[in-house]
Amino acid sequence: GAICEGTSVTFTATPTNGGTPTYQWYLNGAPAGSNSATYTNATLANNDAVNCVMTSSLTCTTGNPATSNTVTMTVNPSQPVSVNIAASATTICTGTSVTFTATPTNGGTTPVYQWYLNGAPVGSNSATYTNASLVTGDDVYCTLTSNISCATGSPATSNTVTMTVNSSLPVSVSIAANPG
């Protein structure tokens, strides 16, 4: 079967005319576990082959001991999930629109994004979040839930961007004539 790296797999022997059988399990031809109808391994690698030899306790059996079929494993590597965000600007003037963009690693074909402003959920399920009413000290981050197979660390939490927002200062000029 196909599994993700680090998955625990239990193989089960189903004897025919075994009486009170004894078992010897093999991993790539080397003895791996014995005297149990099951064999469990959580460190399988790609193309590992597992089979079992069962010795029947019955008399008048043929083909004793019996060798099982071999199961060859497909082991897919773990895929660590992460997300990094960047802002179009981090020091702005009041009322400036800022767009935050998420860059995923191992997000899959349909990742799910959740944006947070000061710890509260905001935005929509999008790789970007835009806000034009930020104030100094606002913290923005996002989480990414991957749909890739063999994902580890999902959902992943991004770095946090802290905003600096400067007050808008109205500028004006007046003139006077002298003498006048």
Image: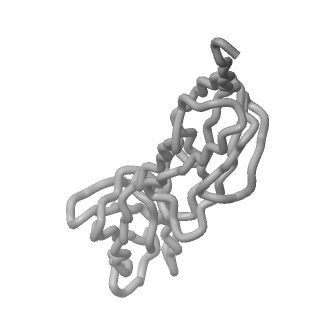
Q: Position of residue 22 (x, y in %)?
A: 41, 61
Question: 51 or 131, which is in the foreground?
Answer: 131
Where the C terminus falls, by quadrant?
top right
Q: Position of residue 25 (x, y in %)?
A: 34, 62
Q: Does residue 147 appear to the left or right of 116 in the view shown?
A: left
User: Which residue is at 54% across, 70% downward?
Assistant: 109
Where on the picture, by quarter, is residue 165?
A: top right
Q: Position of residue 4 (x, y in %)?
A: 44, 60
User: Which residue is at 60% across, 68% downward?
Assistant: 110
Residue 132 visible in the displayed image? yes
User: Which residue is at 49% across, 55% downward?
Assistant: 151
Residue 37 visible in the displayed image? no
In this view, the residue farthest toward the front is: 179
Q: Is residue 124 above or below residue 59?
A: above
Q: Does residue 167 appear to the left or right of 43 in the view shown?
A: right
Q: Position of residue 39 (x, y in %)?
A: 44, 57
Q: Is residue 106 above or below residue 123?
A: below
Question: 166 or 121, which is in the foreground?
Answer: 166
Q: How is the image coloured?
A: one colour
Q: Is residue 114 above or below residue 141?
A: below
Question: 19 or 119, which is in the foreground?
Answer: 119
In this view, the residue farthest toward the left is: 29
User: Which residue is at 51% across, 34% downward?
Assistant: 159
User: How many marks are shown on the rendered structure?
Assistant: 0
Q: Does residue 28 appear to the left or right of 92 in the view shown?
A: left
Question: 167 or 84, which is in the foreground?
Answer: 167
Where the N terminus falls, by quadrant?
bottom left
